[in-house]
Structures are given as C-alpha cells and as structure tokens.
Amino acid sequence: MKIDILTLFPDMFNGFKSESIIKRAIDGDKVSINTINFRDFATNKHKKVDDTPYGGGSGMVLMCQPIFDAVDNIKTEKSKVILLSPQGEKFSQKKAYDLSKEEHLIFICGHYEGFDERIKSICDEEISIGDYVLTGGELPAMVICDSVVRLIPGVIDDESSKNESFNDNLLDYPTYTKPRNYKGMQVPEVLLSGNHEKINKWRNEKRLKITSEKRPDLLKNKVKIEKKGIKENKNKIYIDDIKNIKVTEIKQARKTGNYKISRNEEIKAITILNPHLINGYKLKGKNGSNSVNKILIVKDSFIKKIALKNVRKKIDILNYRFNLVLSNEDDDEGTSRVLGEAEMLKQMIINAYANYLGSENLDKIIKNINYLVNEFVKAKTLQNSFLNNSKQEQRSR
Ligand SMILES: C[S@@+](CC[C@H](N)C(=O)[O-])C[C@H]1O[C@@H](n2cnc3c(N)ncnc32)[C@H](O)[C@@H]1O
C-alpha cells in the first residue's frame, strides 16, 4: 500500500514513521508513507496557502489551488482521496478494514479555520476521528494510518488482529501476565489450567460480558447466525436456514460497493463479496423484503478469478472464430461478422465484467482482443492480396 499525506507540517510525522509497528511495516515494504507539503505547490509569489473567508469571519481558510495541484500530481485511478474533517463519517474499525484493502490512500490534512468548500469536489471521502475539534488533520491522519497499516496482511500476526476489540462486534477479553498474584489480586484459575478449549470458552464469554456491560450498542447490531447453518469452503461461506433476520438498513455495506444481492429470486438470498461486511449489519432481502433465508459470502479474489476464467473462455471462442473465417478464403461476409463480434465482446466485457476484473486486468484483456483483431486483419489482408494476385496471374495466362 502507498500512503501520501498532504500536510503543512510534514515534520510531525517523523516520530510516527520511525517507531514500532509502522516502522516495521515500512522497513518490510508493506507500506510506504510519504508526506507532501502542499505549500510547495502554491503558485503565488509568497507561497501562500490560505486566505481570509469570503463573507467575513475569523481565521484563515485553505485555498483550492495548492491542494488541487498537489492531488493532481500524485493521483492515479487507483487512489482514494480522503479529506480529514470534523464533518466526515466517523472513523471505525470497519472503515479501517475497508481502507486496508486500498492500493493508494491520499490524506489531506486541514489547518486553521478549515478548507475552501470546493476542495471536497476532489475527495472520495471525508473522515472524522471523533466529535471534537483538533488543530489540524495531522493527528487524525496518523490515527487512521496506524489502524489501517496494522490490518495489512503480514504487518501483525493474523491471530492478534482476529481477537481484537470490534472484530465480530465484540470488545477484547481481559489479559494477564506474570506474576500470578499481584498485591493480592489473582490471575483467573482457568488461564493457568493449560486447557485451551476451556480458556477459549472463558475468553468468548468474557468478550460477550464486557461488551454487553460497556458497549451494548455493539451487540445490538450483531447479526445472529445459527451455527448449524454455516458451510464453508476456501472461497465461499454459505449460511442457510436463517430465519427472521430482521431487516433495517445496510447503509455502510452499500456505500462500499462490495455488496450485491443475489439474482436468485426464489431463495431471497444475499451475496456479499466482502466477508468483513457480515459483522454487525442487518441485512435487507431481495426487492426490499423483510427477511433473508440464505446468505452467500464470496471472497473478492474468488469473484475476480471466476470473471477472468469466463472472459478468457470467450476470447478463446473469438480466436477460434477468427481462424474459421481465415480457413474459408472467400468468406468476406464472415470477416465483417467476426469483427463485429469482437467489438461486441469488448463492449460486453466493459459493461458486465469491469467491476469484477479490476482496471489493470480489464486493460490487458482489451489490449489482448485488439491484438487478436489486428493479427486477424493483417492475415486476412495478406490472404486477400495473395488471392487477387493468383486470380490476375490466371487471367493473364
Ligand atoms: C481547527 S480544525 C477546523 C475546524 C472547523 N472550523 C470546524 O469547526 O469544523 C482544522 C482542521 O483539523 C482537522 N480536524 C480537526 N478535528 C478533526 C476531527 N475530529 N477529525 C478529522 N479531522 C479533524 C481538519 O482537517 C480540519 O480542517
């Protein structure tokens, strides 16, 4: 992952980048974190980045030009531009998971009174780290980066992140270390038993108890799934026999764009591409119905694999059709038909598969089809000129 942070105070990030897990992640090439001073992009003589607000009022407001140009300079089609602002969506562990899957994050740190409102037009999201006002976006950027980077695979071990607070909408269980007795306070006996089944059971119970005492709001959102109805394989989790999952909204899930309702009308089923989305969301059935009786959760990577396989099959058929036309030398009608089919295939792939393939694969596939078309046209032209020559030769004899 690449993270670019647009800030007027890049030095604030020195300590952040040079300690602990963030440093390890940078050293291990899991992430690169760059700070960019957007003052460098100011085109005015004094490198001014702010001005007084129209309509009067206190404080200075960050101007459009330096931030627009700085973003323009680093943004690619894979970038997600995030504006740090007290008005944004409140940051959460779920958001951290979503962001940890991005390839390139750009954070814009505000300062002074805030931003020119038009800066929002170049941002994909606005995020707040809580209902309080800080001096600038630098601390929020560090908070978000920290929670996102530790979720990048391989940064911390999977086991630690699985049991952390907010996973499964539960808070963490209590932990103890040596000594067993500290000033009369004992470590719970079960943790000394060596019986891992019992220890896990105790920890799960504690997670539920602590959550219900401290954060009952988290439990309220938890989707209750009957264990017996769950079947799992590497890429899919089927959850059957779900009765009466009462439905309200699935707002956040919809926002990510990873949420899809299955086409199967009969079984009121839901397909969710991203397994993280299941936790804590009430689900809405097909056509707004109020219950869901089956859920299919499919890994994004698996969807991509299947989409690629389907598209490759279609390209193989196109190639076969090109060869068929070439083997029939006089088939001029076939030439325009198969070229039309190639055009239609490209359109179909763009319309139906683009979301699943990702832009990089899509580019490669379209280039591949264009290459086949060019090769076919070249071969057909050569064949035609060869045919014309031999016809002329026959006539002149
Ligand atoms: C002093 S604040 C501006 C506050 C703004 N006038 C308001 O009342 O909403 C300056 C900058 O700090 C950042 N900031 C402050 N509090 C924040 C929060 N809770 N979450 C994210 N960013 C915050 C934003 O980038 C903001 O533009």
Image (cartoon, rainbow, N blue to C red):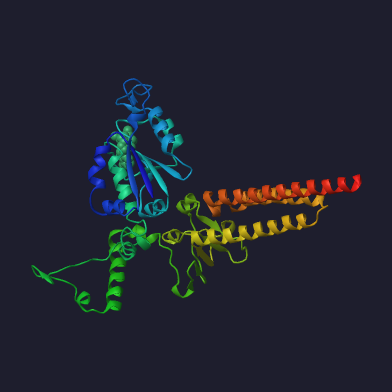
99 and 211: which is toward the camera: 99
Is residue 391 placed above or below 64 in the rendered structure?
below
Name the quarter showing ligand 1.
Answer: top left
Q: Residue furthest top?
A: 45
The picture places residue 382, in percent across and down from the top left corner, at 75, 47
Q: Left or right: 204 with respect to 393?
A: left
Q: Left or right: 148 with respect to 340?
A: left
Q: Residue furthest front?
A: 397
Q: Left or right: 206 with respect to 241?
A: left
- Give the number of marks: 0
136 and 222: which is toward the camera: 136
Is residue 31 placed above or below 267 in the rendered structure?
above
The picture places residue 29, in percent across and down from the top left corner, at 34, 52
Give the residue at x 30% y 74%.
201
Give the residue at x 91% y 47%.
397
Give the residue at x 29% y 37%.
136
240 and 78: which is toward the camera: 78
Give the residue at x 28% y 51%.
22
